Image (cartoon, rainbow, N blue to C red):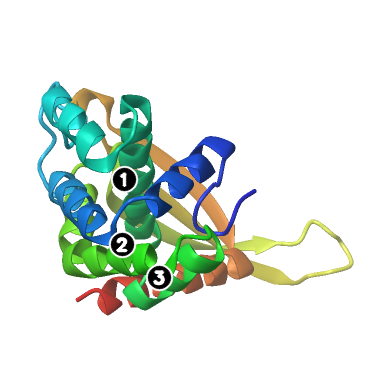
Amino acid sequence: MSSSWIQVTPKFQKGVTLINSIEPAKLRLLLNRIATFMQRDSVKGISSPFTEDEESKLEKSLGLQLKDVRLVIDTASLILQQSAYHIIKPDSLKSKLIEDLKLEQERAAAVASVWESNASLIVESLRKRSVLPYQFADMTWLLNVETSSDKISKRKEPVALLELLLQSGDSDNNRKVKLEMHKPQLQKLYQNLEKIQTQLDALK
């Protein structure tokens, strides 16, 4: 099963079921801790918002086995990460959690509330520490005119030649990617960029 914003696997769905068993107040505290962790600069050797000792305490507090505690943490983290990736508004997120994931209303409200309070900082933090090996740095472009190869047709079509500079942590590994785009492709790219800008503006 999948939706447009998140992939729902059996394991993920089990995590959602476990979240539904957690008291809303405790869930909110857990979510706030995860949201705060997601805003930090990456720290070498630290990949979880909770230490092993804290996870053990969560076992007792939530009445879950350790493996289920970790599944809850992973599931909640993924929900917030995907909310950031798709830049979802809080009200829309609440609806998606209820309709797509079958999250109980009070729990969905807790997730949406924590997301609303932390969205801008999470998005900004994830943007700064992209997990991808390359990040966009610069672009040059040239507008060319392509003549049809059909001898009967003398139509000329504009073609945009784009060169993207992609930077990595190591300047010696920077890459240049060349693209050739016709008008329909450029229009689609522009429309998608406008959607991204609108979603970013909505979080300000």
Q: Looking at the rendering, which quadrant does residue 173 occupy?
A: top left
Answer few, some or many: residues within 10 Å of disc 1's Cα (few below 14, many 20 plus, some between 14 and 19): some
Task: Give residue 136's position: percent from left, percent from top.
Answer: 30, 47
- Left or right, 16 with respect to 153, comes to left
Spot the residue most to the right: 152
Residue drawn at the location 38% of the way across and 49% of the way down: 19
Q: Nearer the viewer, mark 2 or mark 1?
A: 2
- Comparing 29 with 176, the one in front is 29
* As drawn, 162 above or below 77: below
- Write down the residue under mark 3: 94
Task: Give residue 1's position: percent from left, percent from top.
Answer: 65, 48
**Mark closer to the chain start, 3 or 2:** 3
Residue drawn at the location 78% of the way across and 70% of the way down: 154
- Write down the residue under mark 1: 77
- Left or right, 82 with respect to 130, comes to right
- Write down the residue under mark 2: 111
Find numbered disc 3 in the image and state the secondary structure of the residue it sits on.
Answer: helix
**Mark closer to the chain start, 3 or 1:** 1
- Comparing 1 with 45, the one in front is 1
Tell me, yes or no, if residue 132 can be seen here.
no
Answer few, some or many: residues within 10 Å of disc 3's Cα (few below 14, many 20 plus, some between 14 and 19): many
Q: CA gap, disc 3 to disc 2?
A: 7 Å
Amino acid at the residue labelled 2: Val
